[in-house]
Amino acid sequence: MPSNVEIKARVSDQVQFAEKAAQLSQSEGTIIRQRDTFFNCSQGRLKLRDFMNDSGQLIFYERPDTDGPKLSRYSISPTSDPSGLRVRNHLCTSAEICSCSSRLMTVYARAHVHALRPSCLMLLELKVR
């Protein structure tokens, strides 16, 4: 399975963060709207990411529940029917949580820098492949 190292942190100054990310990546980045539904599974984690434009991804991943940098192993399957896939997954297992957010994604060297905006706070997610 492919893997990356993830680091997550709260962002206190959203404007300064966006300016620095744009400066480092030499790009304004891309806004990605998404709705994630997490399903119960016996091993690892399973989520359905719906981009709310008739496309999405079913993502299985294994990542430790620890603070700080962590290795995440993942497998991604694209789908053109995220709503139908959500219904079928509900028949097999129960949904754990559903969250809507938008993210500003920029790329700097091998690092994908995501500024997540779930509800009212902003998180930095740094993924290095």
Image: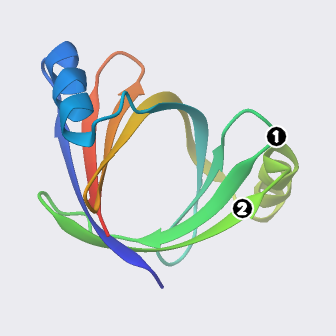
Q: Is residue 4 left or right of residue 91?
A: left
Q: Which mark is residue 15?
A: none
> In the current view of this chain or complex, which residue is farthest to the front?
26
Give x and y (percent) for residue 91: 83, 58
Give x and y (percent) for residue 69: 15, 63
Total labels: the figure holds 2
Q: In the depicted view, which residue is nearer to us: 96 or 45?
A: 45
Q: How is the image coloured?
A: rainbow
Question: How many C-alpha atoms fall within 10 Å of the one at disc 2: few (<14), some, or many (≥20)?
Answer: few
Please report the residue visible at 47 percent of the width from the left and 70 percent of the height from the top.
61
Please report the residue visible at 39 percent of the width from the left and 25 percent of the height from the top.
117
Give x and y (percent) for residue 54: 82, 40
Task: Name the image quarter holding the C terminus.
Answer: bottom left
Whether 94 is drawn above or below 115: the answer is: below
Q: Mark 2–mark 1 contact, CB under 8 Å?
A: no
Q: Please tell me whether mark 1 sits on a helix, a strand or a loop.
A: loop
Q: Is residue 38 left or right of residue 104?
A: right
Q: Which mark is residue 54?
A: 1
Q: Amino acid at mark 1?
A: Asp
Q: Please tell me whether mark 2 sits on a helix, a strand or a loop.
A: strand
Please report the residue visible at 76 percent of the width from the left and 46 percent of the height from the top.
55
Of pointers 2 and 1, the one earlier in the residue sequence: 1
Question: How many C-alpha atoms fall within 10 Å of the one at disc 1: few (<14), some, or many (≥20)?
Answer: few
Q: Which mark is residue 78?
A: 2
State the separation of the CA atoms marked 2 and 1: 11 Å
Q: Is residue 54 left or right of residue 35?
A: right
Give x and y (percent) for residue 67: 13, 57
Please report the residue visible at 26 percent of the width from the left and 30 percent of the height from the top.
22
Whether 63 is drawn above or below 15: the answer is: below
Q: In the depicted view, which residue is nearer to us: 109 or 1?
A: 109
